[in-house]
Amino acid sequence: MNKYYAYDHAPVNFEFTQSVERFHVEEIPPYRFSGSGNFLVLKIKKQDISTWKLIHVITTATGLAERDIGYAGLKDKNATAIQYISIPREAEKSLANIKTPKIEILEKYYNKAPIKIGHLKGNSFVIRLHDVNPKDAPLIEKIATDMSRKGIPNYFGYQRFGEDRASFEQGKIIAQSGKRLKGAKEKLLVASYQGYLFNEWLHQRVKISHIIATETPDKAAKTLSFPPALVRELAKEPQFFKLFLGDLMQGYPEGKLSALRDMQNDSKGFMERKTAPTGLICGSHVQRATVDAYHLEEPYDDSEVGTMRGDRRLAWIWPKDVATKYDAAGRVLQIAFTLPKGSYATTFLEEISKKELHPEPKKLHK
């Protein structure tokens, strides 16, 4: 799968394995819970158990149906994850039936509304990287700090594409069959194909930006087969990721969409982190880019993906709260950061390592 990286440092080597000891993630709720209402919100710490399995444990313990369980997003099995789950308030007493040590209820809140998919601000991560060379520890800190200032491409992580990283191929076949989707598995496979197309588009846009940043306007125009006048205008934009007329910009991190009409003016809002460009998650009922941006988006827009609803996804994000701590004796670097919802920690790490990270999930000792 293609992935063009935005930063020009040399690849940095480290060992990354996603496990309950090395990978910690915590959801950031969108607001303070009300303290009253018909729903109970559970702040749950889980280890070595997927969100789907967590939901199954709760339904078994309480007698609730899966549709009664609210959650904001899926968290990996091979991690220590803190996430928020909502259930009807009347089921509170039956939570005592949960006996597994893999699940710990940290806090309880009453609320007037249940939690729904996407109902979070973002996620905070703390990750332990092993076999980090002492000379690379300050380099990783510098790169991560630069990324927090300048931002990174918001690629989908490898988790989107299944264990063999090829689920999008099955999704493409299903999407183009014209049949009505059956069950959650087929929807996940088609979503994988949608994610693949988005990543391919973003790869191309980052590549274009790199060419414009590193070559003269005339040479870049020839390389890209773009009009020289267009490349000269793009080269004037101060940021790395170049914006095109017709790009759909979104208020950052959540806001309304608006079409880019003035490349230099809109670049200012982008530089100030007020807006960010979006890419297409192809499907039905979704707004497409226009003008120049449309022609860059159209090759990755499969009109046959009509059985799934489309969306727009931020193409560029800014990590926050970046901090590192290095243990020279153990050659372990702990890195903490926060990302907007829907973004992947592995994408952040891959921008540092300059290679795709496909860890073999296994439980390790500290």
Image (cartoon, rainbow, N blue to C red):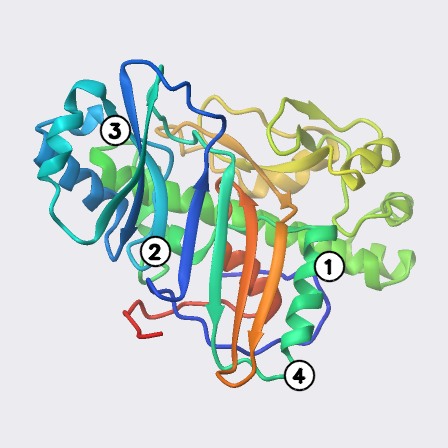
| Res 241 seen here | yes
- Which of pointers 1 and 2 indicates the residue nearer the eye? 2
Count residues near mark 1 (Cα–Cα under 10 Å), then give few for <14, some for 14-19, many for 20+. Answer: some
Q: Secondary structure at mark 1?
A: helix
- Which of pointers 1 and 3 indicates the residue nearer the eye? 1
Q: Residue at x 69, y 50 (%)?
A: 151
- Which of pointers 1 and 4 indicates the residue nearer the eye? 4
Q: Residue at x 39, y 50 (%)?
A: 160
Q: Residue at x 26, y 40 (%)?
A: 186
Per the image, the residue denoted by label 1 is: 146
Per the image, the residue denoted by label 2 is: 80
Point out the tag, 1 or 3, that comes first from the N-terminus. Answer: 1
Point out the tag, 3 or 2, that comes first from the N-terminus. Answer: 2
Relative to 128, 172 lies left or right? left
Disc 2 to disc 4, how far (Cα)?
Answer: 29 Å
Looking at the image, residue 290 lies above or below residue 46: above
Looking at the image, residue 362 lies above or below residue 56: below
Disc 1 to disc 4, how far (Cα)?
Answer: 18 Å
Q: From the top left corner, tell me how far across and down residue 67 is, in percent.
A: 21, 25
Per the image, the residue denoted by label 3 is: 180
Q: Secondary structure at mark 2?
A: strand
Q: Disc 2 marks which amino acid?
A: Thr
Point out the tag, 1 or 4, that comes first from the N-terminus. Answer: 4
